[in-house]
Amino acid sequence: MNPLKKLAGQTAIYGLSTIVGRLLNYLLVPLYTYRFADPRDFGVVTEFYAYTAFLNVVLTYGMETALFNFSAKSDRNPKVYSTALFSLLVSSTLFLIGMGWVAGPIAEVLRYPGHSDYVLWMAWVIGLDALSAIPFAWLRERQRAKRFALLKMFNILLNIGANLFFIGLCKGVYEAGNSGWWEWAGRLYDPDIGIGYVFIANLIASAATVGFLLPEFLAARARPDFKLWRNMLAYALPLLIAGLAGMVNETLDRILLKYLLPVESAMEQLGIYGACYKISILMSIFIQAFRYAAEPFFFSHYQRSDARELYALVMRWFVIACSFIFLAVMANLVWIQYFVGAYYRAGLGVVPILLLANLCLGVFYNLSIWYKLTEQTRFGTYLTLWGALVTLVLNYCWIPRLGYLGSAWATLACYASMAVLSYGMGQKYYPLRYDLKRMIAYPLMALTIHLGTSKIEGLTFWAELGAKNGSLLLFAGLVFLLERKKRADSP
């Protein structure tokens, strides 16, 4: 099969579970914002999942990428998988034991006195997810995309089902007075837990997923190799630092909003920003699905004589796809906005900024192949540390002035600067002939079309929706003509 078509096919399989699941999960946002009318409640969820993102990176510490690298370069030596799995089993167990001791003090520090249960539930979610990371990576490395997608879908659907049960049904019956056929459900709801049922639902899904991954756990039959583990750890630790810096770039704004805004409005603003951040989900879903397929794809093709041309071609079509997604979301924002409550729509101005930021992040992920293939992962650390510095400085300067809008602009500045720096460094150590003109032209074309259609006024809802979606055909037509011309001009 054509390798580019194979990559596209696997991206589609990974994306099916991710896109459908995340879209279904997104439907929980109205559930949260209407069942918990106070935005401060949604702010709690936003903050805890920001911390979770950091800890997920810490507890996997780059072992997924190390598995791909060492397995590809040792002809799939079974010791690689066993060693990585055993390493995460030990570290996850130690983490859970430690969190059992310090959950109370952590809850006090985070300003949630009396809710050490929140901390413990999320600690178990993080530990179980970290433990399942290597079996999922093993499925990707073996290109078993269908089983990967099936298990991911199971996790997401179970999480959604548990949320609908506890928050949709039990809370609804409880507030209605515990009467009728569903009285038993109302008795299950504890108002002191409240928004904590979001964490309970996640824990149920994570525990069940680990159970269904039992065949993958049992596939690790080789004995762990300590020498191999040290080599894998040496390769992975720079990726851990890079991953932590990446989480600073991705989630620190939601933490800083709580501490850099006035106490009386901070959690409310955090809830609004967290809800509107969800609207940029389509871009991040596509990038996540692409990464699942692309990372093992890049490693498996690095010995091809035309590998560099292939990587450059992947980049160009990735930018085209992201530009189309940007335009599609903005064209349909007239109805997408109703997925969040009316109060939350005050934050819609961050959506186009965050979409462009995610596009730049996707470009950076594509560019990162140069330091992974050359085993110079320290450069990934340098680049993400740079991004973390930009994030910290700009959020510190802009949040007090602009609120959550400052966080959005800081995110865009961070990812754009990282992509530019990575391109420059990559051309020195692993030069690729990227089509820079088109990589810049296509996003600018999509942005120009969006700005033009945003001036449309005086139309009915359906007429405006039709006109804006017509701009997608314009963009697709321009891409088709430009790409056909490029193909015709190629020798």
Image (tube, rainbow, N blue to C red):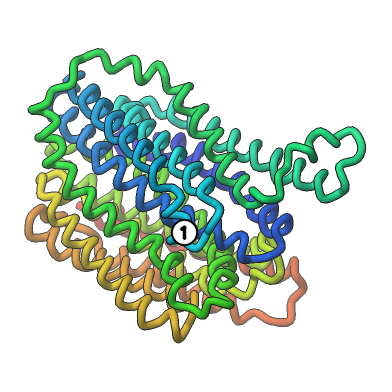
x%, y% of residue 72? Answer: 18, 29
Left or right: where does residue 177 sit relative to residue 479? right
x%, y% of residue 459? Answer: 74, 76
Q: In the figure, residue 412 lies in which quadrant?
A: bottom left
Residue farthest bottom in this picture: 401
Tell me, yes or no, if residue 20 can be seen here: no
x%, y% of residue 234? Answer: 11, 41
Q: Is residue 153 above or below residue 419?
A: above
Q: Is residue 13 above or below residue 366?
A: above
Residue at position x 68%, y 65% from top? 38
Residue at position x 14%, y 58% from top? 426
Tell me, yes or no, if residue 313 can be seen here: yes
Q: Residues within 10 Å of mark 1 (few under 14, many from 20)?
A: few
Q: In the figure, residue 131 lies in which quadrant?
A: top left
Left or right: where does residue 300 sit relative to residue 183? left
Q: In the figure, residue 170 lies in which quadrant?
A: top right
x%, y% of residue 140? Answer: 34, 31
Residue toward you, 179 or 391: 179
The quarter in which the N terminus is drawn is top left
Residue toward you, 43 or 187: 187
The disc labelled 1 sits on which kind of residue? Glu
**Regarding mark 1 in the picture, which secondary structure is present there?**
helix
Q: Which residue is mark 1?
A: 108
